[in-house]
Image: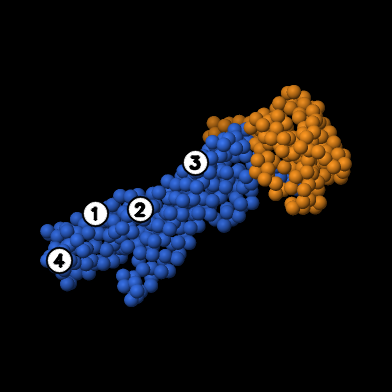
Amino acid sequence: MASVIVLMFLVMGSSQAMRSAWIEDVLSLVPAIVYLIATKYERRRPTHAFPFGFHRVHSLGFLVSAVTLTAVGVLLLVESMITLVRQEHVTIPPVTILGRDVWLGWLMIAALAYSMVPPVILGLKKLPIAKRLQDKVLHTDAMMQKADWMTGLAGIAGIIGLGFGFWWADAVAAAVISASIVHDGVTALRISTAELIDGAPRELDRDEVSEEAEALTRHLKARYPGSEVRLRETGRFINAQILGAPPDSNELPADLWPGDPLRQWRLAEVSFVAPTTDAKG
Amino acid sequence: MKLLASLALICLCSCADLPRDADGTLDRIHRLKSFRVGLIAEQQADAGRSIKFVQALERSTAARALTGRGATEPLLKQLKQGKLDVVIGRMTAKSPWMKQVHMVPLTKAEEADPEEIQLVAITRNGENAWISMVHREASTAALNE
Protein backbone atom coordinates (compact mmCIF):
# COMPACT_ATOMS: atom_id res chain seq x y z
CA MET A 1 0.00 0.00 0.00
CA ALA A 2 2.88 2.38 0.73
CA SER A 3 4.16 1.91 -2.82
CA VAL A 4 0.70 2.63 -4.20
CA ILE A 5 0.38 5.81 -2.10
CA VAL A 6 3.82 7.12 -3.11
CA LEU A 7 3.31 6.34 -6.81
CA MET A 8 -0.13 7.96 -6.90
CA PHE A 9 1.21 11.06 -5.13
CA LEU A 10 3.99 11.45 -7.67
CA VAL A 11 1.69 11.38 -10.71
CA MET A 12 -1.60 12.84 -9.45
CA GLY A 13 -1.09 16.37 -10.82
CA SER A 14 -4.26 18.47 -10.75
CA SER A 15 -6.69 15.63 -11.49
CA GLN A 16 -9.47 15.44 -8.92
CA ALA A 17 -10.17 11.79 -9.66
CA MET A 18 -6.51 10.97 -8.96
CA ARG A 19 -6.58 13.03 -5.77
CA SER A 20 -9.75 11.29 -4.53
CA ALA A 21 -8.28 7.86 -5.33
CA TRP A 22 -5.03 8.81 -3.55
CA ILE A 23 -6.91 10.06 -0.49
CA GLU A 24 -8.95 6.83 -0.42
CA ASP A 25 -5.70 4.84 -0.48
CA VAL A 26 -4.30 6.93 2.39
CA LEU A 27 -7.57 6.50 4.31
CA SER A 28 -7.30 2.74 3.84
CA LEU A 29 -4.38 2.86 6.29
CA VAL A 30 -6.60 4.28 9.08
CA PRO A 31 -8.56 1.07 9.89
CA ALA A 32 -5.31 -0.94 9.93
CA ILE A 33 -3.60 1.55 12.29
CA VAL A 34 -6.71 1.71 14.50
CA TYR A 35 -6.84 -2.10 14.61
CA LEU A 36 -3.20 -2.36 15.76
CA ILE A 37 -3.69 0.26 18.49
CA ALA A 38 -7.02 -1.23 19.65
CA THR A 39 -5.61 -4.77 19.78
CA LYS A 40 -2.77 -3.58 22.01
CA TYR A 41 -5.18 -1.92 24.47
CA GLU A 42 -7.74 -4.72 24.38
CA ARG A 43 -5.33 -7.10 26.12
CA ARG A 44 -4.80 -4.83 29.13
CA ARG A 45 -6.25 -5.99 32.43
CA PRO A 46 -9.04 -3.92 34.09
CA THR A 47 -7.84 -1.12 36.34
CA HIS A 48 -9.38 0.91 39.15
CA ALA A 49 -10.13 3.69 36.69
CA PHE A 50 -11.43 1.26 34.02
CA PRO A 51 -12.99 -1.62 36.00
CA PHE A 52 -14.67 -3.15 32.92
CA GLY A 53 -11.39 -3.42 31.06
CA PHE A 54 -10.58 -2.18 27.55
CA HIS A 55 -12.69 -4.34 25.25
CA ARG A 56 -14.48 -1.26 23.99
CA VAL A 57 -11.32 0.30 22.60
CA HIS A 58 -12.13 -1.67 19.45
CA SER A 59 -15.57 -0.06 19.25
CA LEU A 60 -14.03 3.37 19.76
CA GLY A 61 -11.46 2.67 17.08
CA PHE A 62 -14.20 1.56 14.71
CA LEU A 63 -16.07 4.81 15.34
CA VAL A 64 -12.92 6.84 14.65
CA SER A 65 -12.42 5.00 11.32
CA ALA A 66 -16.07 5.48 10.40
CA VAL A 67 -16.10 9.22 11.19
CA THR A 68 -12.86 9.78 9.28
CA LEU A 69 -14.15 7.94 6.21
CA THR A 70 -17.49 9.74 6.22
CA ALA A 71 -16.07 13.22 6.80
CA VAL A 72 -13.39 12.96 4.14
CA GLY A 73 -15.78 11.32 1.69
CA VAL A 74 -18.31 14.12 2.11
CA LEU A 75 -15.62 16.81 1.67
CA LEU A 76 -14.39 15.19 -1.55
CA LEU A 77 -17.94 14.81 -2.85
CA VAL A 78 -18.71 18.48 -2.18
CA GLU A 79 -15.47 19.48 -3.90
CA SER A 80 -16.39 17.44 -7.00
CA MET A 81 -19.86 18.99 -7.12
CA ILE A 82 -18.40 22.50 -6.89
CA THR A 83 -16.03 21.69 -9.76
CA LEU A 84 -18.95 20.51 -11.90
CA VAL A 85 -21.10 23.54 -11.06
CA ARG A 86 -18.23 25.95 -11.80
CA GLN A 87 -17.37 23.98 -14.96
CA GLU A 88 -13.67 24.01 -14.04
CA HIS A 89 -11.45 22.43 -16.67
CA VAL A 90 -8.53 20.26 -15.60
CA THR A 91 -5.10 20.53 -17.20
CA ILE A 92 -2.98 17.41 -17.53
CA PRO A 93 0.27 18.59 -19.11
CA PRO A 94 3.03 16.47 -20.62
CA VAL A 95 6.16 15.52 -18.66
CA THR A 96 9.62 14.97 -20.04
CA ILE A 97 10.97 11.46 -19.59
CA LEU A 98 14.36 10.58 -21.08
CA GLY A 99 14.13 13.57 -23.39
CA ARG A 100 10.65 12.74 -24.71
CA ASP A 101 7.38 14.47 -23.88
CA VAL A 102 4.83 11.99 -22.48
CA TRP A 103 1.28 12.97 -21.58
CA LEU A 104 0.99 12.71 -17.78
CA GLY A 105 -2.41 11.08 -18.23
CA TRP A 106 -0.74 7.86 -19.40
CA LEU A 107 1.37 7.73 -16.23
CA MET A 108 -1.77 8.38 -14.16
CA ILE A 109 -3.56 5.49 -15.89
CA ALA A 110 -0.58 3.20 -15.25
CA ALA A 111 -0.46 4.23 -11.57
CA LEU A 112 -4.21 3.65 -11.21
CA ALA A 113 -3.95 0.24 -12.86
CA TYR A 114 -1.15 -0.70 -10.44
CA SER A 115 -3.16 0.69 -7.50
CA MET A 116 -5.97 -1.78 -8.25
CA VAL A 117 -3.87 -4.87 -7.55
CA PRO A 118 -2.32 -4.79 -4.01
CA PRO A 119 -5.49 -3.66 -2.15
CA VAL A 120 -7.61 -6.41 -3.76
CA ILE A 121 -5.07 -9.08 -2.81
CA LEU A 122 -4.74 -7.69 0.73
CA GLY A 123 -8.52 -7.42 1.10
CA LEU A 124 -9.10 -11.02 0.02
CA LYS A 125 -6.45 -12.23 2.48
CA LYS A 126 -7.77 -10.14 5.39
CA LEU A 127 -11.45 -11.06 4.99
CA PRO A 128 -11.36 -14.64 6.40
CA ILE A 129 -9.13 -13.45 9.27
CA ALA A 130 -11.56 -10.63 10.10
CA LYS A 131 -14.49 -13.07 10.14
CA ARG A 132 -12.60 -15.48 12.38
CA LEU A 133 -11.65 -12.69 14.82
CA GLN A 134 -15.09 -11.05 14.53
CA ASP A 135 -13.21 -7.77 14.14
CA LYS A 136 -15.32 -5.03 12.54
CA VAL A 137 -12.39 -2.67 12.03
CA LEU A 138 -10.45 -5.31 10.14
CA HIS A 139 -13.57 -6.44 8.26
CA THR A 140 -14.39 -2.89 7.15
CA ASP A 141 -10.79 -2.46 6.06
CA ALA A 142 -10.88 -5.75 4.11
CA MET A 143 -14.18 -4.91 2.37
CA MET A 144 -12.94 -1.47 1.39
CA GLN A 145 -9.75 -2.83 -0.06
CA LYS A 146 -11.53 -5.65 -1.89
CA ALA A 147 -13.67 -3.03 -3.65
CA ASP A 148 -10.70 -0.80 -4.40
CA TRP A 149 -10.53 -2.05 -8.00
CA MET A 150 -13.69 -0.07 -8.67
CA THR A 151 -11.93 3.10 -7.52
CA GLY A 152 -9.05 2.46 -9.88
CA LEU A 153 -11.45 1.79 -12.73
CA ALA A 154 -13.42 4.99 -12.04
CA GLY A 155 -10.18 6.95 -11.95
CA ILE A 156 -9.00 5.47 -15.25
CA ALA A 157 -12.36 6.24 -16.85
CA GLY A 158 -12.06 9.83 -15.60
CA ILE A 159 -8.57 10.33 -17.05
CA ILE A 160 -9.49 8.75 -20.39
CA GLY A 161 -12.62 10.90 -20.49
CA LEU A 162 -10.46 13.97 -19.91
CA GLY A 163 -8.14 12.78 -22.65
CA PHE A 164 -11.08 12.66 -25.07
CA GLY A 165 -11.91 16.26 -24.20
CA PHE A 166 -14.80 15.66 -21.79
CA TRP A 167 -13.88 18.23 -19.13
CA TRP A 168 -16.49 16.87 -16.68
CA ALA A 169 -15.17 13.27 -16.71
CA ASP A 170 -12.56 13.88 -14.03
CA ALA A 171 -15.00 15.52 -11.61
CA VAL A 172 -17.66 12.85 -12.23
CA ALA A 173 -15.11 10.09 -11.54
CA ALA A 174 -14.02 11.91 -8.37
CA ALA A 175 -17.68 12.16 -7.32
CA VAL A 176 -18.22 8.42 -7.89
CA ILE A 177 -15.12 7.57 -5.82
CA SER A 178 -16.18 9.99 -3.07
CA ALA A 179 -19.69 8.55 -2.99
CA SER A 180 -18.26 5.07 -2.43
CA ILE A 181 -16.11 6.41 0.43
CA VAL A 182 -19.18 8.05 1.98
CA HIS A 183 -21.18 4.82 1.59
CA ASP A 184 -18.44 2.81 3.35
CA GLY A 185 -18.20 5.45 6.07
CA VAL A 186 -21.95 5.67 6.72
CA THR A 187 -22.30 1.86 6.91
CA ALA A 188 -19.42 1.70 9.37
CA LEU A 189 -20.87 4.66 11.32
CA ARG A 190 -24.23 2.93 11.75
CA ILE A 191 -22.64 -0.30 12.95
CA SER A 192 -20.21 1.42 15.33
CA THR A 193 -22.86 3.75 16.79
CA ALA A 194 -25.18 0.80 17.51
CA GLU A 195 -22.34 -0.89 19.34
CA LEU A 196 -21.39 2.11 21.46
CA ILE A 197 -24.94 2.70 22.67
CA ASP A 198 -25.26 -0.93 23.78
CA GLY A 199 -27.15 -2.12 20.74
CA ALA A 200 -27.56 -5.84 20.09
CA PRO A 201 -24.53 -7.44 18.35
CA ARG A 202 -24.58 -6.62 14.61
CA GLU A 203 -23.39 -8.53 11.57
CA LEU A 204 -19.86 -7.61 10.49
CA ASP A 205 -20.83 -5.83 7.33
CA ARG A 206 -24.35 -4.51 7.86
CA ASP A 207 -26.59 -2.90 10.44
CA GLU A 208 -28.66 -6.03 11.24
CA VAL A 209 -28.68 -8.04 14.46
CA SER A 210 -26.31 -10.96 13.89
CA GLU A 211 -27.53 -14.53 13.51
CA GLU A 212 -25.16 -15.62 16.28
CA ALA A 213 -26.78 -13.12 18.67
CA GLU A 214 -30.28 -14.29 17.66
CA ALA A 215 -29.30 -17.93 18.26
CA LEU A 216 -27.73 -17.07 21.63
CA THR A 217 -30.85 -15.15 22.71
CA ARG A 218 -33.11 -18.09 21.78
CA HIS A 219 -30.84 -20.53 23.62
CA LEU A 220 -30.70 -18.43 26.81
CA LYS A 221 -34.45 -17.89 26.81
CA ALA A 222 -34.96 -21.65 26.50
CA ARG A 223 -32.37 -22.27 29.23
CA TYR A 224 -33.94 -19.69 31.57
CA PRO A 225 -37.68 -19.73 30.81
CA GLY A 226 -39.63 -16.62 31.70
CA SER A 227 -36.52 -14.43 31.81
CA GLU A 228 -35.65 -11.41 29.70
CA VAL A 229 -32.38 -11.72 27.77
CA ARG A 230 -30.33 -8.72 26.71
CA LEU A 231 -27.15 -8.88 24.65
CA ARG A 232 -24.66 -6.12 23.92
CA GLU A 233 -21.34 -6.02 22.15
CA THR A 234 -18.10 -4.75 23.66
CA GLY A 235 -15.54 -4.74 20.88
CA ARG A 236 -15.32 -8.29 19.61
CA PHE A 237 -17.07 -9.82 22.62
CA ILE A 238 -20.70 -10.31 23.67
CA ASN A 239 -21.99 -9.56 27.14
CA ALA A 240 -25.29 -11.19 28.10
CA GLN A 241 -27.63 -9.97 30.82
CA ILE A 242 -30.43 -12.26 32.09
CA LEU A 243 -33.24 -10.61 34.00
CA GLY A 244 -35.64 -12.47 36.24
CA ALA A 245 -33.79 -15.76 36.69
CA PRO A 246 -31.18 -16.98 39.18
CA PRO A 247 -27.78 -18.12 37.90
CA ASP A 248 -26.68 -21.72 37.76
CA SER A 249 -23.41 -21.66 39.73
CA ASN A 250 -22.02 -24.62 37.76
CA GLU A 251 -22.28 -23.03 34.34
CA LEU A 252 -19.56 -20.98 32.65
CA PRO A 253 -20.28 -18.56 29.81
CA ALA A 254 -18.67 -21.01 27.38
CA ASP A 255 -21.23 -23.65 28.45
CA LEU A 256 -24.04 -21.37 27.35
CA TRP A 257 -22.73 -20.74 23.81
CA PRO A 258 -25.03 -22.57 21.33
CA GLY A 259 -23.03 -22.11 18.13
CA ASP A 260 -19.65 -23.16 16.76
CA PRO A 261 -17.45 -24.20 19.75
CA LEU A 262 -14.49 -22.44 18.11
CA ARG A 263 -16.35 -19.17 18.63
CA GLN A 264 -17.21 -19.70 22.33
CA TRP A 265 -14.69 -16.97 23.17
CA ARG A 266 -17.20 -14.38 21.93
CA LEU A 267 -19.43 -14.79 24.99
CA ALA A 268 -17.24 -12.96 27.52
CA GLU A 269 -19.68 -12.41 30.36
CA VAL A 270 -23.14 -13.52 31.52
CA SER A 271 -24.65 -11.46 34.31
CA PHE A 272 -27.89 -12.06 36.19
CA VAL A 273 -30.23 -9.39 37.50
CA ALA A 274 -32.24 -10.68 40.48
CA PRO A 275 -36.02 -11.05 40.01
CA THR A 276 -36.90 -8.37 42.61
CA THR A 277 -34.49 -5.74 41.16
CA ASP A 278 -35.77 -2.93 38.87
CA ALA A 279 -34.65 -4.31 35.49
CA LYS A 280 -34.37 -0.84 33.92
CA GLY A 281 -30.95 -0.34 35.63
CA MET B 1 -11.97 -13.66 -25.86
CA LYS B 2 -11.64 -12.56 -29.53
CA LEU B 3 -14.34 -9.96 -28.98
CA LEU B 4 -12.49 -8.63 -25.91
CA ALA B 5 -9.22 -8.45 -27.82
CA SER B 6 -10.95 -6.63 -30.72
CA LEU B 7 -12.52 -4.14 -28.33
CA ALA B 8 -9.16 -3.57 -26.64
CA LEU B 9 -7.54 -2.95 -30.02
CA ILE B 10 -10.26 -0.47 -31.02
CA CYS B 11 -9.81 1.34 -27.69
CA LEU B 12 -6.04 1.50 -28.15
CA CYS B 13 -6.39 2.88 -31.68
CA SER B 14 -8.86 5.55 -30.60
CA CYS B 15 -6.52 6.57 -27.79
CA ALA B 16 -3.64 7.14 -30.21
CA ASP B 17 -4.41 10.85 -30.67
CA LEU B 18 -4.97 11.62 -26.98
CA PRO B 19 -5.12 14.07 -25.37
CA ARG B 20 -7.77 16.24 -27.03
CA ASP B 21 -8.91 19.74 -26.12
CA ALA B 22 -12.10 20.28 -24.14
CA ASP B 23 -13.01 23.26 -26.34
CA GLY B 24 -11.27 22.07 -29.52
CA THR B 25 -8.57 24.77 -29.58
CA LEU B 26 -6.00 22.86 -31.64
CA ASP B 27 -8.63 21.56 -34.05
CA ARG B 28 -9.85 25.12 -34.62
CA ILE B 29 -6.28 26.34 -35.19
CA HIS B 30 -5.70 23.64 -37.81
CA ARG B 31 -9.05 24.41 -39.44
CA LEU B 32 -8.71 28.23 -39.51
CA LYS B 33 -4.93 28.16 -40.03
CA SER B 34 -4.50 30.89 -37.42
CA PHE B 35 -4.14 31.33 -33.67
CA ARG B 36 -4.53 34.39 -31.45
CA VAL B 37 -1.62 35.60 -29.32
CA GLY B 38 -1.69 38.23 -26.59
CA LEU B 39 1.63 39.84 -25.69
CA ILE B 40 1.83 41.42 -22.24
CA ALA B 41 3.74 44.73 -22.38
CA GLU B 42 7.27 43.39 -22.49
CA GLN B 43 10.83 44.40 -21.76
CA GLN B 44 13.23 44.64 -24.69
CA ALA B 45 15.05 41.48 -23.56
CA ASP B 46 11.87 39.43 -23.89
CA ALA B 47 10.97 40.57 -27.39
CA GLY B 48 13.41 38.21 -29.09
CA ARG B 49 12.38 35.14 -27.10
CA SER B 50 8.67 35.86 -27.53
CA ILE B 51 8.97 36.24 -31.31
CA LYS B 52 11.03 33.05 -31.65
CA PHE B 53 8.47 31.14 -29.63
CA VAL B 54 5.53 32.44 -31.67
CA GLN B 55 7.37 31.56 -34.89
CA ALA B 56 8.00 28.03 -33.58
CA LEU B 57 4.28 27.67 -32.88
CA GLU B 58 3.48 28.89 -36.39
CA ARG B 59 5.74 26.22 -37.85
CA SER B 60 4.35 23.33 -35.83
CA THR B 61 0.70 24.30 -36.36
CA ALA B 62 1.20 25.45 -39.98
CA ALA B 63 -0.94 28.41 -38.95
CA ARG B 64 -0.49 32.19 -38.77
CA ALA B 65 -0.22 34.07 -35.45
CA LEU B 66 -2.60 37.01 -34.98
CA THR B 67 -0.82 39.10 -32.38
CA GLY B 68 -2.10 41.82 -30.09
CA ARG B 69 -0.59 43.65 -27.13
CA GLY B 70 -2.04 44.72 -23.82
CA ALA B 71 -1.91 44.74 -20.03
CA THR B 72 -1.86 41.52 -17.99
CA GLU B 73 -5.37 41.43 -16.51
CA PRO B 74 -7.35 42.24 -19.69
CA LEU B 75 -5.32 39.73 -21.73
CA LEU B 76 -5.74 36.94 -19.15
CA LYS B 77 -9.47 37.65 -18.97
CA GLN B 78 -9.71 37.32 -22.75
CA LEU B 79 -7.71 34.09 -22.54
CA LYS B 80 -10.15 32.68 -19.97
CA GLN B 81 -13.09 33.68 -22.17
CA GLY B 82 -11.57 31.85 -25.13
CA LYS B 83 -10.87 35.03 -27.13
CA LEU B 84 -7.13 34.33 -27.10
CA ASP B 85 -5.25 31.03 -27.50
CA VAL B 86 -1.99 31.95 -25.78
CA VAL B 87 -0.69 34.91 -23.79
CA ILE B 88 3.04 35.53 -23.45
CA GLY B 89 4.56 37.65 -20.72
CA ARG B 90 6.23 37.77 -17.35
CA MET B 91 4.49 36.16 -14.36
CA THR B 92 5.54 34.62 -11.09
CA ALA B 93 4.70 31.00 -10.28
CA LYS B 94 2.95 32.30 -7.15
CA SER B 95 0.52 34.51 -9.06
CA PRO B 96 -3.18 34.19 -8.04
CA TRP B 97 -3.83 33.36 -11.72
CA MET B 98 -1.97 30.05 -11.32
CA LYS B 99 -5.16 28.14 -10.44
CA GLN B 100 -7.14 29.57 -13.35
CA VAL B 101 -4.69 29.21 -16.22
CA HIS B 102 -1.75 27.01 -17.17
CA MET B 103 1.75 28.51 -17.41
CA VAL B 104 4.63 27.09 -19.41
CA PRO B 105 8.07 28.59 -18.67
CA LEU B 106 9.96 29.84 -21.72
CA THR B 107 13.27 29.88 -19.88
CA LYS B 108 15.52 26.95 -19.02
CA ALA B 109 14.71 25.15 -15.73
CA GLU B 110 18.04 26.05 -14.14
CA GLU B 111 17.45 29.75 -14.83
CA ALA B 112 13.95 29.85 -13.36
CA ASP B 113 13.39 30.81 -9.73
CA PRO B 114 9.78 30.18 -8.57
CA GLU B 115 9.88 33.42 -6.56
CA GLU B 116 10.94 35.49 -9.52
CA ILE B 117 8.87 36.85 -12.33
CA GLN B 118 9.76 34.80 -15.42
CA LEU B 119 8.77 34.72 -19.07
CA VAL B 120 5.92 32.25 -19.60
CA ALA B 121 3.40 31.15 -22.21
CA ILE B 122 -0.07 31.05 -20.65
CA THR B 123 -2.94 28.89 -21.90
CA ARG B 124 -6.47 28.10 -20.79
CA ASN B 125 -6.97 25.12 -18.50
CA GLY B 126 -8.32 21.94 -20.05
CA GLU B 127 -6.98 22.45 -23.61
CA ASN B 128 -4.60 19.54 -23.14
CA ALA B 129 -3.66 18.91 -26.78
CA TRP B 130 -2.83 22.61 -27.34
CA ILE B 131 -0.98 22.71 -24.00
CA SER B 132 1.09 19.66 -25.03
CA MET B 133 2.11 21.46 -28.21
CA VAL B 134 3.00 24.66 -26.33
CA HIS B 135 5.08 22.60 -23.88
CA ARG B 136 6.93 20.91 -26.73
CA GLU B 137 7.80 24.19 -28.47
CA ALA B 138 8.75 25.83 -25.17
CA SER B 139 11.15 22.96 -24.33
CA THR B 140 12.67 23.12 -27.82
CA ALA B 141 13.07 26.90 -27.61
CA ALA B 142 14.72 26.66 -24.17
CA LEU B 143 17.10 23.92 -25.35
CA ASN B 144 18.12 26.00 -28.34
CA GLU B 145 19.07 29.06 -26.20
Q: Which numbered circle lies on residue A191?
A: 2
Query: Element at badge 3?
Result: helix
In front: A5, or B137? B137
Q: Where is A206 relative to A156, above or below? A: below
Marked residue nearer the N-terminal end (1 or 2)? 2
* Kind of residue sitting beneath label 3: Val
Judge from the rendering whether residue A271 lies leftward or rightward of residue A192; answer left or right. Answer: left
Q: Is residue B76 above or below residue A234?
A: above
The chain containing the residue under callout 1 comes to A
Q: Colour of chain A?
A: blue
Chain B shown in which color? orange
- Dot 4: chain letter: A
Spatial separation of the CA atoms under disc 2 and disc 4:
31 Å
Q: Which residue is mark 1?
A: A214
Q: Are the numbered discs 3 and 1 placed on the same chain, yes or no?
A: yes
Which residue matches tag 4? Answer: A277
Mark 2 or 4: the one toward you: 4
Chain containing mark 3? A
Circles 4 and 3, Cβ within 8 Å, touching? The answer is no
Identified at 81% across, 48% down, the residue is: B108
The Cα–Cα distance between marks 1 and 2, rounded to whole angstroms, is: 17 Å
In the picture, the quarter occupied by the N terminus of chain A is bottom right
For numbered disc 1, what is the local secondary structure?
helix
Q: Residue at x 54, y 51 (%)?
A: A23
